[in-house]
């Protein structure tokens, strides 16, 4: 599996932060985190969110009679080694319980992360070129590249929001392959909220030097609510 699906990366990052991602899968994910900024960003998001929730859990001291009762029931009063094992097991179980409660609290309070707007950018032939998903509640834009036409060397495709009555607002360089996910700024989010269309222009490598389209507008696509 390649780390090119933002939704899968986000799910794996949550499992990594919870500690439920184990073995070779965890080691592979750690390599991705070291090499790929987006993977590291999602890991830090989940770690900070879960740590915040864990701080709200209040430790509870069990009554003094609990351990003697456990010893009597399991006949451990004269077996120190067995007692150490059961205490170790109880400690591990407590850790699992805290992690489980933290996860439960998180998922209970997590807002729905569903796309609030989508767009399909297609060529005249009908072939999809890019698929866009806007996650307004999470301030996130996900773009998946499909069948890209050839472009001249030293150029990039740049995506623009087209707010009504205002100048275009850049949404960044479009990927040439695979998928990309980016955090929307306040200006980009406001522009998308006022837009019914998005556009794609051909710009110098790295994007427009002026903050406005300087090259040919090659695609315009409607921005719509997800079905």
Image (cartoon, grey):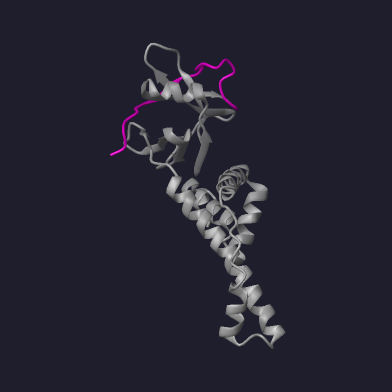
How far across and down, in percent of the image, does residue 49 sit?
Answer: 56, 45
The part of the image, by quadrant, that contains residue 29 is bottom right
The verdict on residue 215 being magenta is yes
- Does the magenta stretch mainly form a helix, a strand or a loop? loop
Q: Is residue 79 above or below residue 2?
A: below
Identify whether 77 is placed above or below 204.
Answer: below
Q: Which residue is depicted at the point 66% across and 73% down?
A: 88
Residue 66, image quadrant: bottom right
The magenta span reads 205-227
Instruction: Determine the image quadrant of residue 52.
Output: top right
Vertical comparison of 84 with 24: above or below:
below
Question: In the image, is 172 to the left or to the right of 131?
Answer: right
Coordinates of residue 12 in the picture (x, y in percent): 53, 54
Quick one: which residue is furthest to the left in this view? 227
Query: Can I make out residue 29 in this image?
Result: yes
In the displayed orientation, state which residue is furthest to the top. 165
């Amino acid at each position: 599996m390649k780390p090119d699906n933002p939704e899968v990366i986000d799910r794996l990052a949550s499992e990594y932060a919870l500690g439920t991602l184990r073995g070779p899968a965890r080691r592979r994910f750690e390599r991705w985190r070291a090499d790929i900024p987006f993977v590291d960003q999602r890991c830090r998001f989940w770690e900070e969110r879960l740590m915040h929730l864990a701080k709200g859990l209040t430790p509870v001291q069990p009554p003094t009679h609990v351990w003697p009762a456990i010893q009597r029931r399991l006949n451990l009063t004269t077996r120190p080694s067995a007692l150490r094992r059961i205490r170790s097991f109880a400690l591990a179980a407590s850790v699992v319980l805290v992690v489980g409660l933290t996860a439960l609290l998180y998922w209970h309070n997590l807002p729905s992360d569903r796309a609030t707007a989508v767009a399909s950018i297609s060529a005249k032939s009908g072939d999809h070129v890019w698929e866009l998903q806007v996650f307004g509640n999470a301030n996130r834009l996900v773009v998946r590249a499909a069948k890209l036409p050839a472009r001249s060397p030293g150029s990039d495709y740049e995506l623009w929001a087209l707010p009504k009555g205002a100048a275009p607002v850049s949404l960044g360089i479009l990927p040439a392959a695979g998928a990309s996910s980016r955090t929307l700024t306040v200006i980009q989010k406001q522009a998308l909220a006022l837009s019914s269309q998005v556009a794609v222009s051909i710009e110098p490598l790295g994007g427009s030097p002026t903050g406005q389209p300087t090259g040919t507008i090659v695609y315009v696509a409607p921005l719509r609510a997800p079905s």
